Amino acid sequence: MLFILITRIIPYLRFDIPLGFDAGTYKYLFEHFGDLGGHSEPKGFYVLTSLLLLFNNTDFLLKYFIIFLELLIGLFIFLVAKKYFNKEAGLFSLLIYSISVTQFKAFTLMYYKNILAILILLIILYYFENNFIFVLSAVLLSGTHTPIFLIFILSYVIYSIKNLKKHAPRLMLIAILSSPFYFTNLRLLEPVKNIESIGAGNFITLETYLFFSLSYIIFSLLGLFKSIKEKKINLLTTLLVINSIIVIFKLFFFNRYIISLDILLILFSGYGLYQLLSDKRILSIVLSSLLLLSSMFFIINESIKIQPDITKENLDEIITLPQGKILTERKYAPWILAYKEAVIAPSLFGDDSSKPEWEDFFSGKNYSLLEKYKPDYIYLDNDLNHPCVHKKDYYYYYQC
């Protein structure tokens, strides 16, 4: 747990700006109860953040509460692995979670809802026999992150088939109590109705994931094999199978599902490592130690190198920009949204211009986007040469 805390806190010893491209967007969403124009998503997550904002500010949520969630995930990884396997497997799983490059990357990219959803999923697994906590957690998951809720409910339905009479009441309760998150805004169901149109999601590819997780994926396969051999077929196993199918066959949102797949593999890897070290063979112990130590050094190095997407100078400039409709680059757009609320940027917040149009604009070949959007102000790294664009300090204003 201490290693998790150290690697997550190191970047904030050097920088005061929250990590991740989405940090600015989350600041805006926290302060506007998840309302982002035509963008629709369940509001359960923002009920929690609104309650937290009664006692803290958005800076606390963006920098420190997410670290607290990471620590809670570590705790529940230990508890879940201990419950489904044994205490030693729980400790090994916690160790492997602490050195997971995938989980560290999810943290540095500020995949906030994804991280909270992983925690809720672990709570569901731990309290599987407790009807009240199980159903309540499932409903909270439905209001937090639709993709993770989707694989949970699909896995639970498949798992329940062998004893539907026992699980049907819980399934019905989850469906009834979750429905307000979705049927009050039918647009939330669009991804489910048009599942073939969902993209890969922004995250590392499966090939990259396999490279980063090589140090423990062998343990995961060993743990899964031993679990099946011992006939330990449960919701955890079902979740791993469903999640793996989505990622391997690239069905939908498959890159982002790598985050939850990694957590499930980590749980099995602890059991696999326990089985391997139980043999007490020197070679197994040495190889396992070398693999884990190499990942540990890699994570420490990454935590030292990582930095926010924008500089403090850029953020100070953004904060002092005049109010109005501001055209900018992608990297600045989330923070301009957070502080100025009206922003135009490539492929963000409803922008419908093509990539070539934006490339021509930034290279100075074609300024037709100025006529299209008629921004009040422009904030860019590069210079603009247009008769209707006038420079003032560190930004431009449009007047024609």
Image: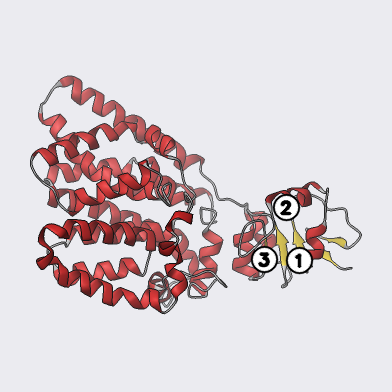
| Residue name at image x 48 percent, y 75 percent | 33
- Mark linked to residue 88: none
Q: In the image, what residue type sits under mark 1?
A: Tyr
Mark positioned earlier in the residue sequence (3 or 1):
3
Mark positioned earlier in the residue sequence (1 or 2):
2
Q: Nearer the viewer, residue 201 or 124?
A: 201
Q: Residues within 10 Å of mark 1 (few under 14, many from 20)?
A: few
Q: Nearer the viewer, residue 26 or 14?
A: 26
The residue at which mark 3 appears reads as 343
Q: Nearer the viewer, residue 230 or 159?
A: 159
The residue at which mark 2 appears reads as 358
Q: Is residue 280 left or right of residue 384?
A: left
The residue at which mark 1 appears reads as 373
Q: In the image, what residue type sits under mark 3?
A: Val
Front disc: 3 or 1: 1
Q: Give the quadrant of residue 321.
A: bottom right
**Res. 2 in view:** no
